[in-house]
Image (cartoon, rainbow, N blue to C red):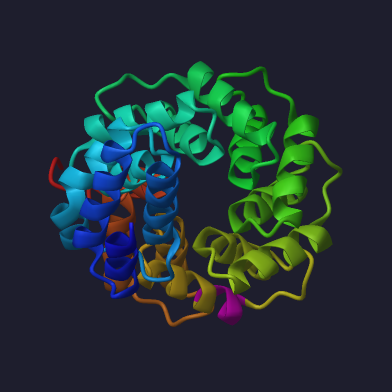
Amino acid sequence: MNVAQDLEEKGEWPKSLDAWLGVAKDYPDSPVGKNHLETFLNHLRERPAPITFQEFQSMREQITESAQLGILSAMLLLGDNLRKPEPKAAFQWFAAAAEKNDATGLVQYGQMLKKGEGGEAPDPVKAATAFKAAADQGDVPGQYELGECYLYGRGVPTDEKHAVELLRQAADAGNTKAMAELGFCYSHGLGVARDFNTAFQLFSKAAEKGNLEAGGNLGVLYINGQGTAPNPKKAAELFEKGAKAGDPFCMALFAQCLELGKGVPRNSLQASGWYRKAAAAGNKNAIDWCDQNSVPYGSGN
């Protein structure tokens, strides 16, 4: 045990992980080895700079063995790092974490079910059930995800008022996605009376924290003069910022500004380029524009 502790303090992660695994296997009736594995791997998950995929690969065998011993943080590490390169394996490990009623595992499992990742067909009902299990534990991402389910009737009956309650809980806890979605509810009168001033405040707060879609919606309020004085230039700045950061919604909005000369000089060529990028990224309005103007986009057009 002293050897494992010394290696951990020196930052020799693979050797330390090997040593703690040895403790867990050599003393199966003692919780010491498993507890240290849980703490050690959880530290790797939550440290400010997450482990790189290369670091993960160097420890993958030991992490997998830890997960097979029932170590929750190992299951989550596997899910986190395999979600893109091996979604089926990631799905299985998040499912295993969800079976342990872990809130993070439940949310990640639900997200994969919602999107149909991991070789499974989308299952909104199972996804909503997973989100509810997380939300019932007070998990903020779970509250946001369940709120979206009720807002749009995904896997549960549509209930806009309950959606707003859940989104408000998550927004009050600092979740920027929930702030943006709640702002959308206020700007469109979904589950609450339409209130552009509140929508403006919510979008502003979420945008300040880096939520690009909120920045796009905030720009819409500036364009229309809703909850604030009209300011097309400020709107275009917000759209451009989000567009350059890769947000399809902002790309389409910035393209429209360039097309119509709202807040920026009119530039049809640049507008077409942003419409194409937005369409290739899946934005429906941009796809419709490209189709109507016979502008090709993406690899299949």
Q: Is residue 235 covered in magenta?
A: yes
Q: Is residue 84 visible?
A: no
Lateral position of residue 124 relative to residue 82, left or right: right
- Which region of the structure is painted magenta? 232-236
Quadrant in the picture for the C terminus: top left
Q: Nearer the viewer, residue 232 or 260?
A: 232
Q: Is residue 264 visible?
A: yes
The relative height of residue 172 versus residue 231 in the rendered view (above or below) is above
Q: Residue at x 51, y 36 (%)?
A: 107
Quadrant in the picture for the N terminus: bottom left
Q: Is residue 265 covered in magenta?
A: no
Q: Residue at x 68, y 55 (%)?
A: 179
Q: Nearer the viewer, residue 78 or 220?
A: 78
Q: Nearer the viewer, residue 109 or 101?
A: 101
Name the magenta segment's main secondary structure. Answer: helix
Q: Residue at x 24, y 54 (%)?
A: 19
Lateral position of residue 298 relative to residue 205, left or right: left
Residue 155, located in which quarter of the rendered image? top right
Residue 37 in the image: x percent, y percent?
Answer: 37, 49
Residue 265 in the image: x percent, y percent?
Answer: 43, 82
The relative height of residue 31 versus residue 206 in the rendered view (above or below) is above
Residue 40 in the image: x percent, y percent?
Answer: 39, 56
Circle count: 0
Residue 266 in the image: x percent, y percent?
Answer: 41, 77
The relative height of residue 17 versus residue 284 in the rendered view (above or below) is below
Residue 223, located in which quarter of the rendered image? bottom right
Lateral position of residue 285 relative to residue 234, left or right: left
Q: Residue at x 23, y 69 (%)?
A: 12
